[in-house]
Image (tube, helix red, strand yellow):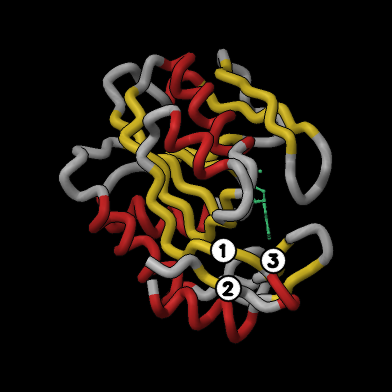
Amino acid sequence: MKLLEERIKEDGLVLPGNVLKVNSFLNHQIDPELMNTVGQEFAHLFRDNNITRILTVESSGIAPAIMTGLALHVPVLFARKTKSSTMNNSLYTADVYSYTKKVTNKISVDQKFLLPTDNVLIIDDFLANGQAVSGLLEICRQAQAHVEGAGIVIEKAFQTGGAMLREQGVRVESLARIASFEDDTVHFVKE
Ligand code: 5GP
């Protein structure tokens, strides 16, 4: 997505450890118009998949997920990283190692919001080693929900997650694919 690539070039900051900081439009401050365009693009890509629910993980996945849910007219469910006191029902859970925070979170969703009849679209902000998406896939597996694919805002294609998921047969659609951060500059995969 050209608009997204331009924004990453303009505002993205390459940090040590192959981390891209995009907190002016995605990870802290959010650009709602850009997120709306992102949501419409995911909705377009998965328009024939009869998506019934969007699944993401808090917090940075929520903005693109909610715009996708709005465009597809389906509910948006986000896995929580900490158990809320209001979550008294049975949960589906998975362990997710965080690439940026170097901690393992137990993510969970209330069983009543994910059904075996669901056709799920997973949405996340970044794809690096695929831990977050794998955790969400595991939650869908427990719920016996069908996963139609994963929509990723920014894929770091030089890391292992994208290949690992595609080898498993998961349809992964990424709106910006980064080939490298050579010379602290963002280089995109040439399609
Ligand atoms: P993975 O689970 O695929 O290894 O990493 C994806 C998760 O880690 C995303 O949900 C995102 O929050 C975080 N993440 C991974 N790489 C980056 C990055 O370069 N920049 C930012 N801001 N977050 C990242």
With respect to residue 117, does 176 lie above or below? below
Q: Residue at horizontal 63%, vertical 23%? A: 94
Q: Evaluate whether residue 20 shows in this view.
A: yes
Q: Is mark 3 within 8 Å of ligand 1?
A: yes
* Quadrant location, the C terminus: bottom left
Q: Position of residue 188 (x, y in %)?
A: 52, 70
Q: Residue at horizontal 69%, vertical 25%? A: 95
Instruction: Examine the image and state in which quarter residue 114 appears.
Output: top left
Q: Residues within 10 Å of mark 2 (few under 14, many from 20)?
A: some
Q: Position of residue 38 (x, y in %)?
A: 39, 65
Asked if the residue at tag 2 contacts the one at tag 1, i.e. Cβ–Cβ closer than 8 Å, the answer is yes
Report whether 48 appears left or right of 189. Answer: left
Earlier sequence position, callout 1 versus callout 3: 3
Q: Residues within 10 Å of mark 1 (few under 14, many from 20)?
A: some
Q: Observer-nearest residue: 145 or 178?
A: 178
State the separation of the CA atoms marked 3 and 2: 12 Å
Q: Amino acid at mark 3?
A: Leu
Q: Position of residue 5 (x, y in %)?
A: 48, 76
Tag 1 secondary structure: strand
Q: Amino acid at mark 2?
A: His
State the separation of the CA atoms marked 1 and 3: 12 Å
Q: Residue at horizontal 49%, vertical 28%? A: 137
**Could you say which disc has been placed on residue 179 in the image?**
1
Q: Give the labeled residue for mark 3.
A: 20
Q: Please identify, in this view, whether the residue under mark 1 or under mark 3 is nearer the observer.
A: 1
Q: Residue at horizontal 52%, vertical 75%? A: 31
Q: Give the labeled residue for mark 2.
A: 187
* Quadrant location, the N terminus: bottom left
Q: Position of residue 131 (x, y in %)?
A: 63, 36
**Could you say which disc has been placed on residue 147 in the image?**
none
Q: Evaluate whether residue 76 shows in this view.
A: no
Q: Amino acid at mark 1?
A: Ala
